[in-house]
Amino acid sequence: MRPDQDPVIEVEDLAVHYRLQGGALARLLGLETRTVKALDGVSLQLGRGEVLGVVGESGSGKSTLGRAMLGLAPATAGSIRYRGHDDAEAQLVSAMSPRALRGLRTDVQMVFQDPGAALNPSMTIERAVGDPLVVHGLASGAELRRRVHEALERVGLSPVERFASKLPADLSGGQKQRAVIARAIIMGPQVLVADEPISMLDMSVRAKILQLMLDLKSDLGLTYLYITHDLASAKYFCDRIAIMYLGRVVEIGPTAEIFAAPRHPYTQALLAAVPDPDPTRMLPRDLPRGEVPDAAEPPSGCAFHPRCPAAFAPCGWEARDLRDQLERYWAGSGLADYESDARVVGDLGAVGTHRDGGLRISTRDPDAAAALLDRARAADVTDPFWRGVTGWRTESDGVRIDLAPGQEPRLRVAPGGEGRVEVACHLHDPSVSHADTPGP
Amino acid sequence: MARRVRTPRVFQTIWNTQGLARYLFLTGVLITGVFVVFALLAPWIAPYDFAQRSVDGVRFPKLAGASGEHLLGTNDQFYDIFSRVIWGARTALLVVGLSILLSAVVGVPLGIVSGYTGGWFDRITVFLMDALYSFPSLLLAIVFSFLLRNAIGGGILAAALSLTAIYIPQYFRVVRNTTVAAREATYVEAARAIGAPPVTVMRKYVFGNVVQSVPVIGTLNAADALGTLAALGFLGLGIQPTEASEWGYDLSRALDDVSAGVFAPAFWPGLAIIALITGLTLVGEGLNETLNPALRRRRLRPVVLTPREEA
Ligand SMILES: Nc1ncnc2c1ncn2[C@@H]1O[C@H](COP(=O)(O)OP(=O)(O)OP(=O)(O)O)[C@@H](O)[C@H]1O
Ligand code: SF4
Ligand SMILES: [Mg+2]
């Protein structure tokens, strides 16, 4: 985004939490239900006329961000502001009534991932594409027909007569996506949220749809939020890129800058990833312990820390990490070791949080537990986890493990990058001490 | 457009059904067809009106045997049995059709609104409908016909309305559940994304995609509705003999005659009930079998490999 412009959309500290439905009994009794933090404190700005890419693994909250911009996902906290024109009053999307939100959608539109599912199977293309105008009472009769034909022609569904009366089932994937795009542009919107618009299309039509979207952008002066799994298309298509992880933006900046000098360890892993043969999945390949954590219980501190190869003292270590550490140790050691250790710590339930801070292993044999920690650490001394452990000592009924205080990294302007790159990582925060804290 | 394409395909599917199922279905169509003809052409087929007891001032005999004037004889109320059976087809199909139509007209929109809006309204309606559904249907029909008899009398409409109450929950359940699934579909989210208000979303985007299961429920209910109608008539709670001819009522009147050794007044209405119920059941099951993919058993044809031609 150029600094001399007002953003079209400004997202500030946006949170979208979904309450997971517990069982019927839990709901009846009003018990606490789990919440998924689909978005948790996202701030970004969408500049007029730019293409902002949103990249991240499945479940990172990309679609939720896009849907929130249309008011389709309700904001739990934070705000979204929309400004139709540079001199227009900003509207607070996150606080709009349903009626006002419906009005907003003449300006902000959406293109969906699966064109086969995004069109009503029992509506002809002509009716589907014209329905936005009908719904908003913007056109009818011959005028409606004219504008629908114009839109269909604009997206390359011509001769229009061949497509207008067809049902979605009679069209190919690429043609359906063109119809979806026609429906999205027919009201002359300012902003288009494109949620993985090409990921379900055949390789052969992907480039054509991207080209169509670029043409539309320059012809109609559109602004895009382009959500994707696919870094290659993001590199081709986007002016700026936001990298998301577990509901947070971890790095955002100009495309060239992100690709040339990725700062966040997660971004580095994504860029190093071998292209996956299945384009709907994107897996960073060289990350240790590759699972994406449960979004309902994100890791503390930096949500990426359990997978981060560069994690260090302040990254937010917790009991789960010690359990994982012990499991990995046992996986690598012999069965005999495991059996004698299991007698000491029982199952991993013995590993918990100490009431005075830090972690604790409850056991009747504290010395054996301490010895286990010694062995586990010696077996894998380079593991980032040990950088967070400042020491341990035995107590009457267990071992207390001291941890460096963890904190959540905030998105802040990264050093270098001419102030245009923001990154959320302690490595790039000058106020955090980078000295590795040695263990006992 | 959609209709024009789909209807022939439906019949083709049925036609292509193999083996016994096909013959059962065709038998059902034949039987039902006969009664439909009776119903449509009743004034021309039946020699007398359904409530007629005399011709040219001459009263019909009571419990007469079959004769030239009375093909199947007369019953204890001096009615011509043959005419009553023919006119009864009209009553039966009218009541059944009307009740199915009315319960769909109430149940389908209610199911869509309930499933789409969710929340408290949904929970309360689901609870009420489940309660209604778990009630024995005949009991429910009896209660409603009692209530309606005071309000609108004992005619065809009253009978249809009492049956309607029984079948509403079935449409409601099916439509509500498909709506709950459709609500999550991308095209419904897309409809909201273009700014369509909830009523428009339900009308234009949900309705067309959830009503497809409705015709099948209708055909399955038809036989059941006919049985309930006859039962109501048998209990004297259905249609009054002067309002329309109804087989169940005639059957109940004729029971005493059976013990007296006169069978015709009971036999013919009874046969009509059994035949039409059988016909409707066969049609319903046949349609269900072919149209409802969830219930359809896959009939796999063996793959025939044509021998490769020698070069
Ligand atoms: N309506 C909902 N109810 C409950 N949880 C939801 C809902 N929508 C999304 N979530 C959860 O929020 C998180 C983020 O989902 P979202 O769809 O935004 O991810 P995404 O990045 O778009 O993933 P993908 O690449 O698979 O599309 C996920 O954990 C998802 O399960
Ligand atoms: S803050 Fe940076 S270094 Fe620490 S875990 Fe997160 S990404 Fe890794
Ligand atoms: Mg998504």
Image (cartoon, rainbow, N blue to C red):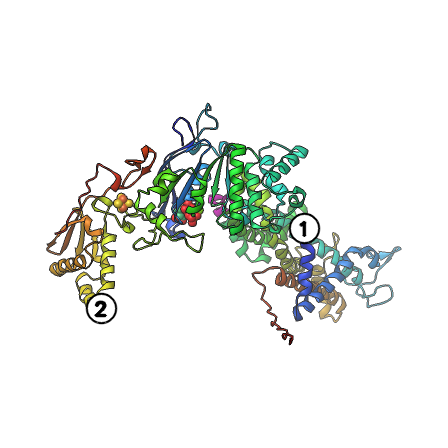
Quarter assignment of residue A46: top left
Q: Which mark is residue B255?
A: none
Q: Which mark is residue B3?
A: 1
**In which quadrant is the C terminus of chain B drawn?**
bottom right
Work out whether residue A269 or residue A26 is closer to the camera in this orientation and state it. Answer: A269
Q: Amino acid at mark 1?
A: Arg
Q: Magenta span has A26?
A: no
Q: Which residues are magenta?
A: B116-125
Q: Residue furthest front?
A: B311
**Relative vertical location of residue B126 with respect to residue B307 in this rendering, above or below:** above
What x and y, as percent, mark residue B291? 62, 59
Q: Residue furthest top?
A: A87
Work out whether residue B146 or residue A139 is closer to the camera in this orientation and state it. Answer: A139
Q: Chain of mark 1?
A: B
Are the residues flagged by discs 2 and 1 in contact, CB closer than 8 Å? no
Going 60% across and 51% down the picture, which residue do you hit?
A169
Label 2, label 1: how far apart the Cα atoms are? 68 Å
Q: Is residue B70 left or right of residue A271?
A: right
Work out whether residue B121 or residue A161 is closer to the camera in this orientation and state it. Answer: A161
**Relative vertical location of residue A268 with respect to residue B88 in this rendering, above or below:** above
Q: Chain of mark 2?
A: A
Work out whether residue A354 or residue A125 is closer to the camera in this orientation and state it. Answer: A125
What x and y, as percent, mark residue B213? 60, 54
Mark 2, residue position: A335
What x and y, as percent, mark residue B17? 66, 66
Quarter assignment of residue B277: bottom right
Q: Is residue A383 left or right of residue B36?
A: left
Disc 1 residue: CB within 8 Å of ligand 1? no
Q: Nearer the viewer, mark 2 or mark 1?
A: 2
